[in-house]
Amino acid sequence: EKLFYLPAAHTDFLLAVVAEDLGLVGVLVVVLLFAWLVLRAFAIGRQAATLERPFPALVAQGIALWLGVQAFINMGVNMGVLPTKGLTLPLMSFGGSGI
């Protein structure tokens, strides 16, 4: 599939390549790592908010939201649930335009 069917296997459809090569376990690892990263960034933002540091709290929460939404949209496109948007998978896709 990755050599013949996927139009941009190294950018937009990287999760499909991971699924083809590593199967369900590989996809679950990628999804869980993104979930952990987003939850950890929200925890950092909450901790900064309790220390009455509003700017670092908003920065951490903004980064978490940015990574989470972009990864969610890319994973939805790869599963065929969402239409193709051209968003890359953050921190994994080829090129520097993902982040």
Image (spheres, rainbow, N blue to C red):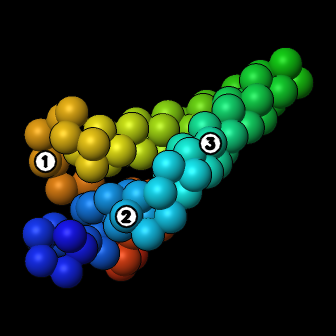
Q: Position of residue 68 (x, y in %)?
A: 48, 38
In this rendering, the answer to whether 89 lies above or below 45 is: below
What distance separates the C-alpha of mark 3 from that of mark 2? 18 Å
Reading the image, the residue beneath label 2 is 20
For mark 2, give the secondary structure: helix
Kindly identify the residue that appears in the image at 50 percent across and 64 percent down. 22
Q: Are marks 3 and 1 in contact (CB under 8 Å)?
A: no
Locate residue 99: give its quadrant.
bottom left
Kindly identify the residue that appears in the image at 76 percent across and 23 percent down. 46
Tell me the number on the disc at residue 84. 1
Locate residue 53: give its quadrant.
top right
Q: Quadrant of the N terminus?
A: bottom left
Q: Residues within 10 Å of mark 3 (few under 14, many from 20)?
A: few
For mark 1, give the secondary structure: loop
Kindly identify the residue that appears in the image at 13 percent across and 48 percent down. 84
In this rendering, the answer to whether 46 lies above or below 78 is: above
Q: Nearer the viewer, residue 5 or 38?
A: 5
Q: Residues within 10 Å of mark 2 (few under 14, many from 20)?
A: some
- 84 lies left or right of 44: left
Tell me the number on the disc at residue 32. 3
Q: Are marks 2 and 1 in contact (CB under 8 Å)?
A: no
What distance separates the C-alpha of mark 3 from that of mark 1? 23 Å
Of the two numbered discs 2 and 1 on the same chain, state the one appearing first in sequence: 2
Which residue reaches farthest right? Answer: 51
Query: Mark 3, mark 2: which one is toward the viewer?
Result: 2
For mark 3, give the secondary structure: helix
Of the two numbered discs 3 and 2 on the same chain, state the one appearing first in sequence: 2
Q: Are marks 3 and 2 in contact (CB under 8 Å)?
A: no
